């Protein structure tokens, strides 16, 4: 069995998905979960791209102990220096340096000759290697590059000190045969290739990212890159959970091992989906709601007779639990604390108390509180910024009748602690509620998207609302869960507005730490 390293880029390439905008606490929670999932390397961001990214990468580098933390950098000394500042406190700092090598990119994007690109790559790798013990060099758009040029530049950057060579299919153009053959060619023609790890990084524009990654492994790649739920630029990146389960279920065909803990897949996927607001299609392989559902009579009959007739993956393998009823009305603080520790959450005393109060309020309305409900409560509390002056919902009422104009009345406290209330109408209940909230907050709001999902199943499932808006021109997302859809909607609206204050507080804390 050959060991394959897993490089997760959910927080960098994944965060480049349109409309995704994670705050620092959410990124840290995702990073912790990726550590639990067992990734070897996590790309925490692009430190030189913004102050916020720099701070998140630095916070993750300080937090994560069991994975190498990396950040993306362009081929400039300034990017490399900023990245070092963000990553130097990591257990194993690593830089991910990239430069395009395809004729299209070199000519139209970089405006450089192949020779200039080669010299720049070598110069920047040597410079970065003086700081970083691990250095991955990516030949951006490798799959559309001239193979002989690729061979020459790879040899030179290895001599300059690169420890990993990544050959991305940047625009998701390659077929599995083509992509595999690039790895084979590079392995056979770069004389010093045995000094480095070869890595595959695939995009899903033609729906072949996972197949391409597997083809690369079969042709010598010993590292694969991807994201949770396959999120990322355009059609996204290779789904790590799909690669992981394919390697496991078809080990007869793929004699490769990874350090991934497969039964953490469901939780990792749920967390990323909630924080990014990117819902998972029900038919998505491995993690979709229907991935283990058998609808047709013939299939149900077969599965009842013998599960293996139609089930190649068990839900338990990926951490989907069939019986997830956990706590109820009579569960006390002790049982609650035990349960959340079992679930792997570490909350401060203040946050533990807050989570317990929310849990108790929920048990007044919902008889059975499931793992999924608890997970929603805990992740919301875990990523809440404490002690911030913000808008808080005091009460609301919505009047709806098929013959009347929907009307909402809302009372709030403002960040200054003043109680305000008003009423507005809308074409529907949610619009009336949003119009009323918008009238009450002083910030300038432009709502761009609104989504409602249920958490778990059944008539009394929790509602989860996701909103996207600009607040005073800054794009933000908000999310909240509640037993009632309108309450979840109102809270998600305010959560988005309050993020402006949360982000100010996080930035102030970071400045105080430096
Ligand atoms: O897809 C790509 O080429 C990238 C590089 C920055 C590695 O994400
Ligand atoms: Zn990419």
Image (cartoon, grey):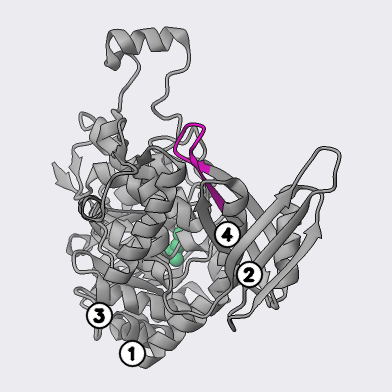
Q: Earlier in the sequence, mark 1 or mark 2?
A: 2
> Whole-Å distance between the Cαs marked 2 and 4?
14 Å
Q: Earlier in the sequence, mark 1 or mark 3?
A: 3
Q: Is residue 141 visible?
A: no
Mark 3 falls on what kind of element?
A: loop
Q: Could you say which is closer to the camera, residue 365 or residue 146? A: 365
Nearer the camera: disc 4 or disc 1: 4
Q: Which residues are magenta?
A: 454-465
Q: Residue at x 76, y 44 (%)?
A: 400
Looking at the image, do the residues carrying marks 1 and 3 touch, with CB atoms under 8 Å apart? no
Q: CA distance from mark 1 to mark 3?
A: 23 Å
Is tag 3's residue or tag 4's residue first in the polypeptide sequence? 3
Q: Say the numbered circle drawn on residue 132.
A: 3
Structural crowding at the residue carrying mark 4, measured as other residues with C-alpha within 10 Å and reported as few (<14), some (14–19) or many (≥20): many
Residue 125, image x, y percentages: 32, 79
Q: Give me the disc on residue 492.
A: 4
Quarter the C terminus occupies: bottom left
Q: Is residue 196 left or right of residue 375?
A: left
Residue at label 2? 412
Q: Residues within 10 Å of mark 3 (few under 14, many from 20)?
A: many
């Amino acid at each position: 069995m050959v060991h394959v390293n897993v490089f997760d880029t959910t927080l960098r390439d994944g965060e480049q998905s349109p409309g995704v905008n994670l705050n620092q606490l959410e990124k840290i929670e995702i990073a912790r979960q990726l550590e639990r999932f067992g990734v070897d390397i996590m790309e925490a961001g692009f430190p030189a791209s913004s102050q916020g990214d720099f701070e998140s990468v630095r916070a993750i580098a300080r937090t994560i102990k069991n994975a190498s933390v990396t950040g993306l950098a362009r081929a400039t000394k300034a990017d490399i220096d900023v990245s070092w500042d963000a990553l130097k406190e990591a257990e194993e700092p690593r830089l991910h340096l990239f430069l395009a090598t395809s004729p299209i990119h070199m000519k139209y994007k970089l405006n450089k000759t192949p020779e200039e690109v080669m010299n720049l790559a070598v110069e920047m790798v040597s410079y970065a290697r003086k700081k970083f013990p691990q250095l991955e060099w990516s030949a951006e758009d490798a799959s559309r590059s001239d193979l002989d040029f690729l061979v020459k530049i790879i040899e030179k950057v290895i001599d300059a000190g690169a420890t990993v060579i990544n050959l991305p299919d940047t625009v998701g153009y390659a077929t599995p045969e083509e992509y595999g053959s690039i790895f084979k060619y590079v392995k056979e023609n770069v004389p010093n290739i045995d000094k480095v790890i070869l890595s595959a990084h695939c995009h899903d524009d033609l729906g072949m990212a996972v197949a391409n990654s597997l083809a690369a492994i079969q042709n010598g790649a010993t590292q694969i890159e991807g994201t949770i739920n396959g999120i990322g630029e355009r059609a996204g990146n290779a789904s790590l959970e799909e690669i992981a389960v394919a390697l496991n279920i078809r080990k007869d065909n793929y004699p490769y091992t990874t350090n991934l803990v497969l039964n953490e897949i469901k939780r990792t996927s749920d967390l990323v989906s909630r924080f990014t607001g990117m819902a998972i299609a029900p038919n998505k392989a491995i993690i979709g709601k229907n991935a283990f559902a058998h609808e047709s009579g013939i299939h149900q009959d077969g599965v009842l007779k013998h599960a293996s007739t139609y089930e190649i993956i068990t839900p338990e393998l990926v951490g989907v639990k069939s019986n997830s009823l956990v706590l109820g009305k009579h569960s006390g603080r002790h049982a609650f604390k035990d349960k959340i520790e079992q679930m792997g959450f570490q909350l401060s005393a203040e946050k533990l108390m807050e989570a317990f109060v929310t849990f108790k309020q929920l048990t007044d309305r919902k008889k059975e509180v499931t793992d999924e409900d608890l997970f929603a409560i805990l992740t919301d509390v875990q990523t809440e910024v404490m002690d911030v002056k913000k808008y808080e919902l005091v009460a609301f009422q919505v009047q709806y009748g098929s013959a009347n104009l929907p009307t909402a009345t809302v009372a709030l406290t403002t960040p200054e602690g003043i109680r305000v209330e008003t009423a507005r109408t809308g074409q529907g209940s949610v619009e009336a509620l949003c119009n009323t909230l918008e009238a009450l907050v002083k910030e300038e709001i432009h709502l761009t998207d609104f989504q409602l999902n249920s958490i778990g199943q059944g008539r009394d499932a929790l509602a989860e609302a996701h909103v996207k808006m600009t607040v005073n021109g800054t794009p933000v997302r908000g999310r909240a869960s509640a037993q009632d859809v309108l309450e979840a909607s109102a809270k998600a609206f305010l959560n988005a507005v309050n993020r402006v204050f949360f982000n100010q507080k996080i930035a102030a804390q970071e400045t105080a730490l430096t």
